[in-house]
Image (spheres, rainbow, N blue to C red):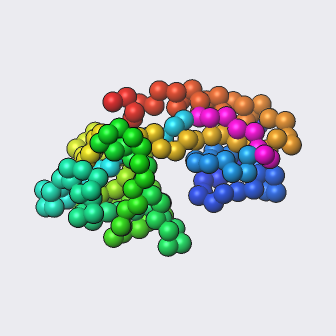
């Protein structure tokens, strides 16, 4: 039995491209043609390097973020808004005025580590840097589950045994992710 894995941020057409299984983050807008199983709800936090915070200060509220350099996630001229928790506990949408916009998480992490600004990063991506003290969470009350992650497969095909094994392993691994233990 062979398993072929491809990593990309492109939304693939599973049926057209003959793909047995995909992991999707976010909305399942094409869900009529797909079966899905929820794997995990990604948590994200507002983070910055200590060197940035020493130089520019620590924001005390969401409103303070407008006075800071923000690293945003975006593509094709559109910066993705942050879903964050406001001081009253409700989820709110914050549209960052990003000075640096990157289309992938790892370069965002690298930019935050280099002191380029404040970023809204998934906890799975920032966990090691946070543990080593290379990043700090700012506005810790804003930590939220913001993106649901699913395993998806075409409803037109029977789920293969190897795909079922992968899905079960993903669900088990992400049921108590070590980076979200705090």
At which x and y percent is residue 41? 51, 37
At which x and y percent is residue 19? 76, 49
Find residue 81 and report its image quarter. Answer: bottom left
Q: Is residue 140 rendered to the left or right of residue 55? A: right
Name which residue lies at 67% across and 47% down: 28
Could one spot residue 143 in this view of the protein?
no
Type of secondary structure dominating the magenta stretch: strand
Frontmost residue, 13 versus 59? 59
Name which residue lies at 35% across and 38% down: 89
Most extreme residue toward the bottom, as rendered?
77
Q: Taking 103 as reference, is 47 above or below it?
A: above
Name which residue lies at 60% across and 57% down: 8
Frontmost residue, 86 versus 52? 86
At which x and y percent is residue 168? 65, 28
Q: Taking 165 as reference, is 145 above or below it?
A: below
Does the magenta portion include 58? no
Question: Which residues are drawn in magenta?
Answer: 32-39
């Amino acid at each position: 039995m062979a398993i072929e894995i491809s990593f990309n941020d492109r939304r693939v057409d599973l049926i057209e491209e003959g793909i047995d299984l995909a992991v999707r983050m976010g909305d399942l807008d094409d869900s009529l043609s797909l079966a899905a199983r929820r794997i995990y709800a990604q948590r994200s936090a507002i983070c910055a390097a200590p060197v940035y915070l020493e130089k520019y200060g620590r924001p005390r509220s969401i409103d303070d973020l407008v006075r800071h350099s923000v690293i945003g996630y975006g593509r094709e001229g559109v910066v993705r808004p942050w879903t964050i928790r406001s001081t009253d506990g409700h989820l709110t949408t914050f549209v960052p005025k990003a000075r640096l916009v990157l289309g992938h998480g790892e370069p965002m992490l690298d930019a935050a580590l280099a002191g380029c600004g404040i970023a809204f990063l998934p906890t799975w991506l920032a966990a090691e840097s946070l543990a080593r003290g290379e990043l700090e969470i700012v506005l810790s009350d804003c930590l939220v589950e913001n993106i649901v992650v699913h395993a998806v497969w075409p409803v037109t095909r029977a789920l293969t045994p190897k795909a079922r094994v992968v899905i079960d392993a993903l669900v088990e691994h992400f049921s108590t992710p070590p980076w979200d233990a705090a």
